[in-house]
Image: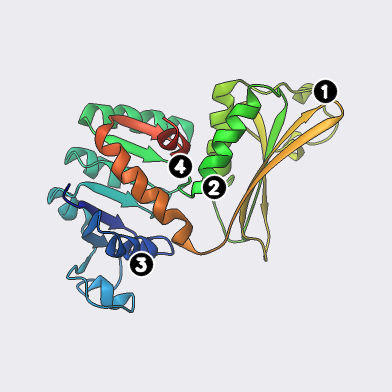
Amino acid sequence: MAAPLSICVSGALGGVGRRLVEGVRDDPAFTLHSAIARREVGRDVGEVLGGAPLGVAISDDLEAALRAKPDALIDYTHPSVIRQHLAWAFAHQVPVVIGTTGLSDADFDEIDEAARAAGVGCATGNFAITAALLQHFARFAARHVPHWEVVEYNKATKPDVPSGTARELAELLGRVREPEIALGDDQLIGPVAARGAEFGGARVHSLRLPGYASAVEVHFGLPGERLVMRHDSDADGAVFVHGSLLAAQRIQSTTGLVRGLDTLLFA
């Protein structure tokens, strides 16, 4: 029987991170190597989360944790720090699951190059299983329907626009082919911004309103017919746990960046 995979959770007291700590605790295929957070430093992470002690003290020193060589880092933190976290991980040849959003296509190209130079695997995307299925089915649809746009919904206080899920979906579909646009920007009457931002050649629209939870839709259209695919998730970070841990396992045997959990599921 293989030894449990040791996991460093960065953002361990966040909405997803705390669920990851619990998921690692409850799955014999994994063991908690370290828990990184900015508060409650020095306290046992299990007790901070309201459970039994886990024998792992919360630390605010991610580089030191990575120097101790966990099998994988799972990072759910902030776009302002993720690049530094990746640099430390690659310097110590630790594979990374990037749950943090707000990165661009250009960022991912650089991350892929750095991961390959370090000889380690790395994965990014929305790690909810049904979000991965949406990406998979939407790629198939884009091969047959040349017109699509993406709409995403989120809480009023979410700062990154579009969401990482919507941006990645548009960019992944753009790699299948760029959608056909009926009217170019020079043919529009009124503010071009009203047509949304462009990613992967497609229009992406972001709503930020109180009362909304996270959702993303991709709308495909042909004359006389339409296809809408939608993924919804609630505010509980537990939806990302299974996919994040699955990605941590799969990237042990890869090199470079893998974009989208669907790529790992259906490879």
Report the disc number at residue 130. Answer: 2
Is residue 54 rendered to the left or right of residue 228? left
Task: Indicate which label's residue lies in the foreground, 2 or 1.
Answer: 2
> Measuring 22% from the left and 55% from the top, which residue is drawn there?
62
Q: Earlier in the sequence, mark 4 or mark 3?
A: 3
Q: Earlier in the sequence, mark 2 or mark 1?
A: 2
Dot 1 falls on a residue whose secondary structure is helix
- Could you tell me how far apart the alpha carbons at marks 4 and 2 are, in whole angstroms? 12 Å
Q: Amino acid at mark 1?
A: Gln
Query: Who is closer to the viewer here, 112 or 194?
Result: 112
Visible in this render: residue 211? Answer: yes
- Could you tell me how far apart the alpha carbons at marks 2 and 1 are, in whole angstroms? 38 Å
- Could you tell me how far apart the alpha carbons at marks 3 and 2 are, in whole angstroms? 24 Å
Residue 91 in percent (x, y) is at 18, 39
Task: Indicate which label's residue lies in the foreground, 4 or 2.
Answer: 2
Q: What kind of colouring is applied to the model shown? A: rainbow
Query: Who is closer to the viewer here, 66 or 80?
Result: 66
Query: Who is closer to the viewer here, 117 or 83?
Result: 117
The residue wearing badge 4 is 125
- Could you tell me how far apart the alpha carbons at marks 4 and 3 are, in whole angstroms? 20 Å
Question: Is the C-beta separation of discs 4 and 2 under 8 Å?
Answer: no
Image quadrant assignment for residue 54 = bottom left
> Measuring 14% from the left and 48% from the top, which residue is drawn there?
69
Q: Amino acid at mark 2?
A: Thr
The residue wearing badge 3 is 13
> In the image, is residue 86 above or below residue 13?
above
Q: Residues within 10 Å of mark 2 (few under 14, many from 20)?
A: some
Q: Earlier in the sequence, mark 3 or mark 2?
A: 3
